[in-house]
Amino acid sequence: MQFLTDEGAIPTPEEEETREQVIRELKKIVTDWVKTVACQERVPPRRVTATVLTYGSYTLGAHGPESDIDALCVGPCIANLPYHFFAVLRQILKCRPEVSGLQTVENAKVPLMRFRFSGISVDLTYAQLPVLDAVQAINTSSPQYLRRLDSRSWKSLSGVRVNEQIVQLVPDQEKFQVLLRCIKLWARRRGLHCHLLGFFAGIHLAILAAYVCQRFPNATANGLFTMFFEIFAHWPWHIPVDLHGQQTNCTRSDGCLMPIVMPCSPPELCASNMTEGTFRKIREELMRGFVLTKDLGSHDFEWAWIFEPFPYSTTYEQFLRIALCAPTSEELHDWSGWVKSRFPYLILKLEDNGIECDPNSSQEVDHTVVKPNIVYHWGLIPQSDTLLDTSSLKEDFMKYVINDVYGKVKCTDSELTLSLVGASELPKSMYNDSFYSRHLHQYGVGYQAAADCWSTIG
């Protein structure tokens, strides 16, 4: 706990109050919004209600100072997604002085609006209930309402439902929160916490943490963190992780490289963008954590070893440089959000060309370029003597980026360039000459797991 505090992984009381204020304001905005919708649809405003529910790490009590607030706007049957949510509510939010960087993600499986409210990042999704009084319906959680939801509303609501189940299934809430904070910090430091890039989403880590807590209800927080690595470094990934212990028909051949079951009814697998390359890195990092924590009694052991930032500059010799730029900062924000949502395709395209990559989610700025810009550097792992043609790769990727009207509009004044650079050309911020890297060979830093180590531990 002291280490987490020292590392800034636990919000201060002032930061907590800011988040609570943001949620209160969002609820007020949505309450006023639904009255506006009622007037537009000629329905008595007193009969219509809407609210905002939170889920994710904030509701689980495991958020950090930099964590987003995952929020769900629950609206009535008269408020539809395309117009009332993405047009009317968006305009209301845009006019608020506390709101900045407003971006809509309308074509995703779970459509949402993404923005900053008083400096706090918010992901706001929408669920349309088949009733006028949405507040009463969501509070009763009546199965008859849930059965009548459209598919998008069902997916949006699943985050809230899964959160409720996890809270009920964890034997000790406080120890679960400590464990999840540790796992999230480890995943961020080791470059494993970005769902779009094929790594963990927050829900994956929450379920894995809950599973460990279920297995060892009397363990200390330190012991739970150790067991997390021992269990999942050796997990047989043809078997899904399931908090209910149910049999689920999902195998590696189905494309589920790391199947994790959401604790809801009916059971569903967590969505994943994992590829063979990102799956391999996750397994190697789990094994590294296991090797580091298997001897906690060592007199010179330090927790900081586990959370050491991943050494990209010394691990890979070549990088794919992805540069995005636009005429204004606002357009860059919109453009980069759109391109990032397409990154899974680019990762798979590289693997099709015989090149695995380690997509680093950190963003750099090229100060030699006048226009607002963002630059990413992905470590490349060629599987053979494959030569990468960045021109054809860009051409193919851009076709995917602008494959609908929405993408074409965003691409009008914005640019994307792909190039290959060596480790010596990386920005200084990506160099990590850590004390721990240079003195921990006996603990297996950079451990490459053997192919036959992925056996069951029961």
Image: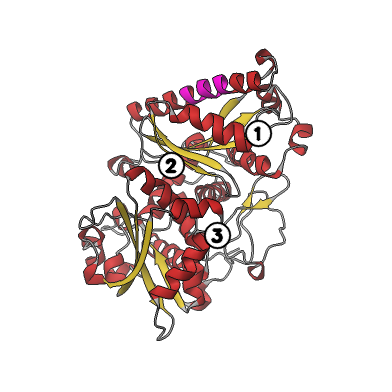
What quarter of the picture does the C terminus occupy?
Answer: bottom right
Residue 403 got which mark? 3
Residue 80 got which mark? 1
Hey, which residue is sitting farthest front in the picture? 412
Distance between mark 1 and mark 2 Cα atoms:
39 Å
Q: Is residue 106 magenta?
A: no
Element marked by disc 1 = loop
Q: Which one is closest to the eye, mark 1 or mark 2?
A: 1
> Secondary structure of the magenta portion, mostly?
helix
Q: Nearer the viewer, residue 210 or 331?
A: 331
Q: Amino acid at mark 3?
A: Asn
Q: Amino acid at mark 1?
A: Asn
Q: Is residue 361 above or below residue 171?
A: below
Q: Amino acid at mark 2?
A: Val
* Rendered location of residue 284, percent (x, y): 43, 68
Dot 3 or dot 2: first in sequence order is 2
What range of the chain is rendered magenta? 25-33
The residue carrying pointer 1 sits among few (fewer than 14), some (14 to 19) or many (20 or more) residues within 10 Å by Cα, namely some
Element marked by disc 2 = helix
Which quarter of the picture shows residue 294? Answer: bottom left
Residue ID at (27%, 54%): 365
